[in-house]
Image (tube, rainbow, N blue to C red):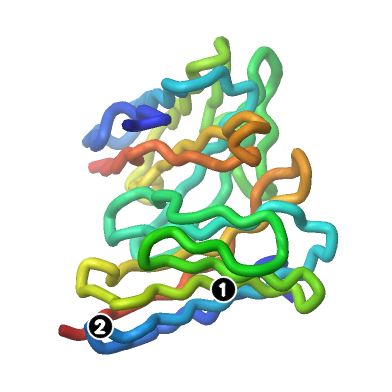
Amino acid sequence: QKEVEQNSGPLSVPEGAIASLNCTYSDRVSQSFFWYRQYSGKSPELIMSIYSNGDKEDGRFTAQLNKASQYVSLLIRDSQPSDSATYLCAVKRGYQKVTFGTGTKLQVIP
Amino acid sequence: GAVVSQHPSWVICKSGTSVKIECRSLDFQATTMFWYRQFPKQSLMLMATSNEGSKATYEQGVEKDKFLINHASLTLSTLTVTSAHPEDSSFYICSVQGPTSSGNTIYFGEGSWLTVV
């Protein structure tokens, strides 16, 4: 079992729809969770971080964390073509190194 | 603004030569930096953890004598690809672990494209 699992996609959604990206992790004592966006040929950029169960909203983005089920998700409302990228889920425990998923490619169709 | 600065953004070198990539933490002192490599359309691969004032910790399968890492100060880590070969052509990205106040968030540099000809 991979430490952090993501569906590689591509996930295709029409413009204006909600994109739902999911991530599961294996280390039950993970404490910090991050979502990064990576455009082709560019380095990852941080979108959101979440540390406690529940939802965290930032603009069109909502991160959801469920530690009991060991999953974290990212919702993108009103998806735009500019949201087309690969989304990386990252998980961290304390001062351990962060573990990245392989990413989900999102395509927003105009 | 940028938290991590990486230089150069792209470099072309001849096979057999060495090339150095710099990674600077701009906003805070970083005792730990990370170096990743990413081939086209593939996922990030952690190469090594750079520790200020001590030897880097390399991931399994990464040649420490080929990929030299120096972390001489709290704001600068360098990766030197020695005796580069075409198969070393890749996107190299450094990252910095932020302070506790940031939740130890990982911030990435802009990345460096290396092409070995």
The answer for which chain carries disc 1 is A
Q: Which residue is mark 2?
A: A16
- Asked if marks 2 and 1 touch (Cβ < 8 Å), the reply is no
Which quadrant would the C terminus of chain A be assigned to in this image?
bottom left
From this view, report whether residue B1 is shown above or below residue B87.
above
The furthest residue to the right: A29
Find residue A25 and report its horizontal and vertical position in percent: 71, 69
Q: Mark 1: give few (<14), some (14-19) or many (20+) Cα within 10 Å.
A: many
Tag 1 secondary structure: strand
Q: Nearer the viewer, residue B64 or A39?
A: A39
The kind of residue on which mark 2 rests is Gly
* Tags 2 and 1 both on a single chain: yes
The kind of residue on which mark 1 rests is Ser
Q: Nearer the viewer, residue B90 or A25?
A: A25
Q: Which residue is mark 1?
A: A73
Find residue A31 and report its horizontal and vertical position in percent: 75, 53
Q: Identify the disc placed on residue B94.
A: none
Residue ID at (35%, 40%): B111
